[in-house]
Image: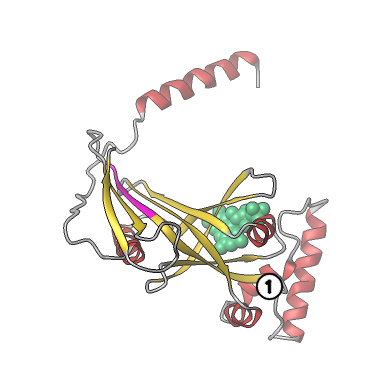
């Protein structure tokens, strides 16, 4: 690309950013009266509404963790379920991946999601519980052969020297699964983020965003009653 073409692209991007303010569309009302006592219940209600509204992949959320140097890290992953009584958000990952190691060293995390069609954001912070190897193995066996084979490849986030190296590891994983359908990826782990606080954010084109914050009555606790407060936009 020539320098002139690059400069033109930069101008185009600047114009695109100016021309596209977010949330300029009809957005739902967020009635703050009579909300569920637990944020996990409201998370479930909003996620159901997101599916029904046709938001693509609304169950894909951002998981933020912290490494041992205190540096934040984040990536998206699939939410597997909501444990309403335990105010938990359930996901699965490889314990040998960077996020798995970060969670083993510092079992604290945040989950964030934004659904553009609805102009809704949810933020949850809390403590991460790591399921037992038996529970994680059962979760692994409940998955499709395709998903199990992909997990059995392993080495997530390690440098890949060639696509042939991946293809060969994927072939080996498929052969292993054919020979032993009960084979389990050793690092496969189920995690539950137990909420300590949560915020539900309903965007408004006129910037009169509605924000509801849930916190535990006992600060930092992962059990007990919740309080709700409105926040300034
Ligand atoms: C739509 C989507 C769904 C994903 N789902 C998962 C998932 O459920 N579990 C997971 O470990 N990684 C998932 N990933 C991959 C992660 O974003 C990330 O690349 C990978 O887990 C490595 O992260 P790490 O290096 O921080 O450990 C998904 C990625 C995308 C784009």
Q: Residue furthest front?
A: 218
Residue drawn at 21 percent across, 51 percent down = 30
Residue at 34% in and 35% down: 22
Q: Which residue is drawn at 77% across and 86% down?
A: 179
Q: Mark 1 points at which residue?
A: 149
Residue, x 74% and y 67% (percent of image)? 153
Q: Is the magenta stretch mostly helix, strand or loop?
A: strand
Q: Quadrant of residue 47?
A: bottom left
> Looking at the figure, which quarter contains the N terminus?
top right
Q: Is residue 13 depicted above or below 230 in this figure? A: above
Q: Answer with left or right where residue 227 lies relative to residue 79.
A: left
Give coordinates of residue 79: x percent, y percent: 48, 64
Residue 160: x percent and y percent?
79, 52
Estimate the x, y position of residue 126 in percent, counting from the top left.
48, 58
Determine if the magenta segment contains residue 114: no
Number of disc labels: 1
Give 145 or 229, whichever is nearer the viewer: 229
Q: How crowded is mark 1: few (under 14 residues within 10 Å), some or many (20 or more)?
A: many
Query: Which of the image's four quarters has the C terminus?
Result: top left
- Magenta-span inclusion, residue 199: yes
Ligand 1 has an atom within 8 Å of the beta carbon of the residue at disc 1? no
Horizontal arrangement in the rendering, residue 122 relative to residue 153 (left or right): left
Ligand 1 visible in quadrant: bottom right
Q: Is residue 152 left or right of residue 30?
A: right
Which of the pair 93/178 is nearer the observer?
93
As helix, strand or loop, the secondary structure at mark 1 comes to helix
Residue 146 occupies which quadrant of the picture? bottom right
When the figure is inspected, residue 105 is found, relative to residue 133, above or below; the finding is above
- The magenta segment is 198-203
x, y (%) of residue 141?
61, 82
């Amino acid at each position: 690309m020539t320098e002139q073409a690059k400069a033109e692209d930069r101008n185009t991007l600047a114009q695109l950013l100016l021309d596209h303010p977010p949330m300029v569309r009809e957005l739902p009302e967020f009635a703050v009266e009579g909300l569920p006592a637990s944020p996990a219940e409201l998370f479930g209600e909003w996620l159901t509404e997101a599916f029904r509204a046709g938001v693509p992949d609304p169950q894909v959320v951002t998981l933020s963790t912290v490494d041992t140097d205190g540096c934040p890290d984040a990536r998206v992953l699939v939410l597997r379920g909501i444990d309403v009584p335990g105010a938990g958000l359930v996901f699965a990952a490889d314990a040998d991946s960077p996020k798995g190691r970060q969670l083993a060293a510092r079992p604290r995390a945040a989950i964030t999601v934004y659904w553009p069609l609805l102009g809704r954001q949810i933020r949850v912070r809390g403590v991460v519980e790591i399921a037992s190897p038996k529970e994680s193995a059962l979760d692994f066996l409940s998955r499709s052969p395709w998903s199990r084979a992909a997990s059995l490849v392993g080495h997530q986030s390690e440098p890949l020297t060639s696509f042939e190296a991946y293809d060969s590891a994927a072939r080996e994983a498929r052969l292993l699964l054919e020979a032993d359908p009960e084979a389990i990826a050793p690092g496969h782990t189920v995690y539950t983020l137990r909420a300590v606080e949560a915020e539900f954010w309903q965007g408004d084109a006129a910037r009169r965003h509605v924000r509801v914050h849930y916190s535990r009555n006992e600060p930092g606790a992962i059990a007990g009653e919740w309080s709700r407060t409105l926040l300034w936009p």
